[in-house]
Image (spheres, coloured by chain):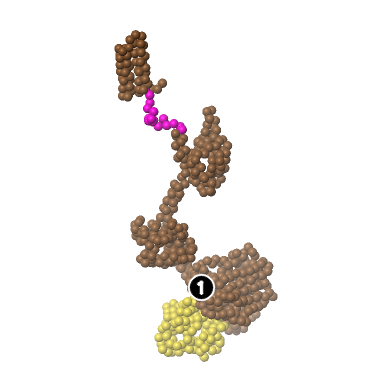
Chain colours: A yellow, B brown
Amino acid sequence: MIKLLHVEDDADIREIAKMALELSGEFEVVQCDCGEAALERVADFAPDVLLLDMMMPGMTGRQTLERMRENPALADVPAIFMTARAQNSELNELRSIGATEVISKPFDPMSLADQIKAAIS
Amino acid sequence: MPKIKFDGRTIAAFSAGLFLAVAWYTLSGAVLSGWPAEVFPVIGAVIIAALMSAFAVRKPATAIQHIGDVSLAQQLRLLKTHTMVNVVDTQNLLVEVNDLLLEATGYSRDELIGQPVSKLYANDGTSFADQIRAKLCSKEGWQGETLLRRRDGTICITQTTVTPLLDSDGKWIGSISARTDITKTVELIAERDIGLTLHELRDDVWIVDEKTETLKYMNRAAKNRFGWTPTSYTDITLTQMAQEHDCKAILDACAALKANKETFIKLEAHIFGTKFDVSTKWLHPNTPNGRFLIMLNDISDRMAEERKQADFISMVSHELRSPLTSIKGAMGLLLSRAAGELSPKAEGLLEIAHRNADRLVLIINDILDMEKISSGRLDFDIKEFDVSEMVKEAVRSNSAMQQRSGMNIRCVGVDAPHIVETDPNRIIQVLINLLSNATKFSKPGDTVEVMIESLASGVRVSVRDEGSGIPEKDQHKLFQRFADMTNSDRVAKGGTGLGLSICKAIVESLGGTIGFESREGEGATFMFTLPTRISDKVQEPVRPMLRSVG
């Protein structure tokens, strides 16, 4: 099972992503609604992959990742961003701070699991 | 009989005459004897008195005592040397013209005498001459400005007075016109007015000498920017300005005009700490009067407003994506039986909803792209990529729509690689758009052909359909924004009307060209080219190229 930490402020999107990933039977999904909560959650849930929403109130996905990277245990964990703002310049910037993949919203729930697996393989 | 004026000169003449007459009578009476002594003293005295009287009352021949004494001939001579004069008969035919008129108009006397006076007038000369003639018929004069057309076609502006000529019985027999050339005066007034207008313009205006590149003129706005007096700027060079006042863009614009032998250039530049539209016009190039007319339009407010508007569109469009993610995701999961089996009717209805959610995503994407194009924020991720792979990807993306419509797709030339330097995602977007259009306008059983051809310096990709074609009257607006032919058609075909204008912006920004061939009833072929290498082209010109769209 792939341990995935999903950080997303929109409850509906969280629910759909969780259902889509669990449907594949290959993911153990833990979800948080903000970056601050995610930073606390990683203390007892060592994720194999991070799935981060970009635009969130409070800490953005980018700031959340930067804080997580300060923890040596999370320094190399693959990070995948989800964003509704998929400008090339922004995508390149996300990659430069360690994003393994960027998934555009709206995403296809039926191919989400495959996209994540391909990104971390 | 002239009136005698008894001034000092007259009295002296009378006195001298009386004295001489008495002296003659006395002396000749003493000298002569006999009958001559009876006759000559008397006759001589009378003659002397008469001559002196005549001298006393005569007017001096060489001096004019009153202006009214100038003869009519003299006045006419003066008039003829100062003004253009012409005389016409009652039919408005020229019967006399003076040398000045001939000199000013370039005609010979033979070319004018006997001709209608309207020959001299610019524009609708006949009608104008008739208007004046109507006044003269009623024995009234006329005064005003007249435009004469010289023999070489140029215009001469005159201040004219026309007076009717009457015979001794008071009958109208023609008219005489006196004209003063005021062309120069009018031009000077016009120049002064233009100068005043330039001076009061809100935009900064500079005039720079072509050779020395020194400032020759600055309007009020330009001078105020530097706090300069009316003359303190003269003879400052553009190079000095560029060094001291952060306006190198203006120096560069003038240099570019000279280098490219062009007469006009417009660019956006950040100078004096703000954003300007800089328009530079080269007047009278390579002549002693060569000048650069430079106009600076402060666009910082406009840019800020545009940016606010673009940010708002961007924010709204992005905000729409979050609920759409949930809607599409939920329907996608339902359709994949994540929540259990569906009845055929429920599945059909969900498919409709899902399809329309997809359409909504495409519309939002189009609006976002158009906003990026308008604001020059459409960016590219350039890499070497195989066009054949792009075509295959686009065909795969279009497969669901293709299956629904019952048409076929044939790919030609995709077996061999065609490597170009481009933004593959953007080109796939163009291909999906063209394929989607071709599919929309195809009937079940039709074939859409996608073909890749190698060119000397790149590739050409064409998408040909067997649809209804594009009416000739609509072809010119095909690449404009919102160009779908009618609202009802747009609804029926599900387009935003932005697709082709976005394709054009993308292809041109990537250094290619886009076009189409179509006849109504015979389908349409859309084709675009891509250069093998585009790095040099894409760096800078993206924004100007994009702004020309739609």
Pick the front one: B387 or B94: B94
Judge left or right: residue B445 versus residue B457. Answer: right
- Residue situated furthest top in the rendering: B34
Sort mark 1 into few (<14), some (14-19) or many (20+) by Cα contacts within 10 Å: some
Across and down, in percent, residue B104 comes to: 49, 44
Residue extending furthest toward the right: B445
Looking at the rendered image, the quarter that the N terminus of chain B falls into is top left
Name which residue lies at 46% across and 64% down.
B258
Q: Could you say where residue B103 lies in the image, as x and y percent from the top left? A: 49, 43
Give the answer, above or below, for where A51 lies relative to B521: below
- Report which residue position mark 1 lands on: B537
Q: Which residues are magenta?
A: B57-73
| Camera-side residue of B238 and A75 | B238
Q: Is residue B351 above or below residue B9?
A: below
Where B499 falls versus A14 (above or below)? above
Q: Nearer the viewer, residue B155 or B364?
A: B155
Q: Main secondary structure of the magenta part?
A: loop
- Give how far across and how far down residue B86 sits, in percent: 51, 38
Task: Give the vertical position of B289 relative to B256 (above or below).
Answer: above
Can see residue B295?
no
Evaluate whether residue B529 shows in this view: yes
User: Along the horizontal axis of the image, is B453 left or right of B85?
Assistant: right
Q: Residue at point 43% right, 66% down?
A: B252
Residue B66 colored in magenta in the image: yes
What residue is rendered at 56% in x and 45% in y?
A: B124
